[in-house]
Amino acid sequence: MNSPESAPPDETLAAWAQRGDRAAFDELMRRHKDGVYRFVRRYVGNSDDAYDLLQETFISAWENLRRFEVTRSFTAWTRTIALNKCRDFSRRQKFQRLFRQLYAAEPNCPPASPAQLAEARETAAEQVLKQQRFDAAVAALPALYKEVLLLTTVGAMTQEGAAAILGTSTKAVEMRLRRAKRRLAELLMPTREG
C-alpha cells in the first residue's frame, strides 16, 4: 500500500472496501488482525481456536461490510464481531463438553450410572443457567456501561483505548466502568426469598 504517513485512514479504506476494493479490506485486516487475535486469544484461551475465530471474524466482516457505518470505529466494529464469534464458540464448547460427559464413555471405563448422568446433567444445567444469568445481566446494562465493560474487560483494552473508540475521556470511561461493575454486581446478587 502506501507509506504510513500517506496511508488512508480506516474510514476511507472501509468506504473503498464497501465498493468492492478487496485490497482496501486486506489493508484493514492487516491493521487490525493482531488486536483482534489478542482479544480472541484471551477470551478462548487457546491459540489454535483463536486463529480459527480470527478468520471467522474477518470473513464475517467482509460479508457484512455493507452494514458498517464508515463514521464509526472499525476497531470497535471488528471487536463486536469477534466477541459474538467468541460467545458462539463458548456455547458450542459447552455443548460438546456436556455431550462428551453424558454420552461418550471411554472403552475401558464402565458406563456412567443413571445417578452420575443425572448429576452431570444437573451440573451442566446449573452452568448454563449461570451463564445465561450473567449474559442477561450484561445485556440489561445501559449501553453506556455495557460498551465500556466489554471493551475494557472482555476486549482487554486500556481505558485510554476505550475512550478513543467511544469518543470520550479516560475519566468518563473510568467512572462508567466503576458504575457498570457495581450495577452488574447488583443484578447478579442472589435474591432473598422472604
Image: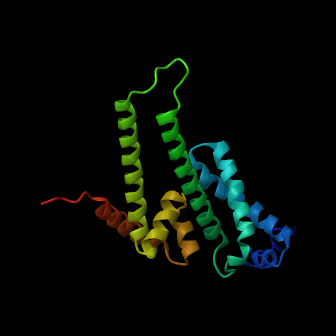
x and y percent of residue 71 in the render?
A: 66, 82
Q: Say how many tags the image has.
A: 0
Task: In the rendered view, tell whether residue 46 sits above or below residue 133.
Answer: above
Say which of 39 and 66 sits in front.
66
Location of residue 72 (image quadrant): bottom right
Location of residue 31 (image quadrant): bottom right
Residue at image point 39% right, 27% down = 113
| In-image side of 21 versus 99 (left or right) | right
Residue at image point 74% right, 68% down = 63
Task: In the rendered view, tell whether residue 63 sits above or below residue 100.
Answer: below
x and y percent of residue 41 in the render?
A: 60, 49
Say which of 154 and 157 sits in front.
154
| In-image side of 150 versus 64 (left or right) | left
Say which of 178 and 55 sits in front.
55
x and y percent of residue 6 in the render?
A: 83, 74
Which residue is farthest bottom? 71
Say which of 127 and 82 sits in front.
127
Residue at image point 69% right, 80% down = 70
Q: Quadrant of the N terminus?
A: bottom right
| In-image side of 123 versus 64 (left or right) | left
Which residue is farthest front? 114
Task: In the rendered view, tell whether residue 136 sits above or below residue 112.
Answer: below
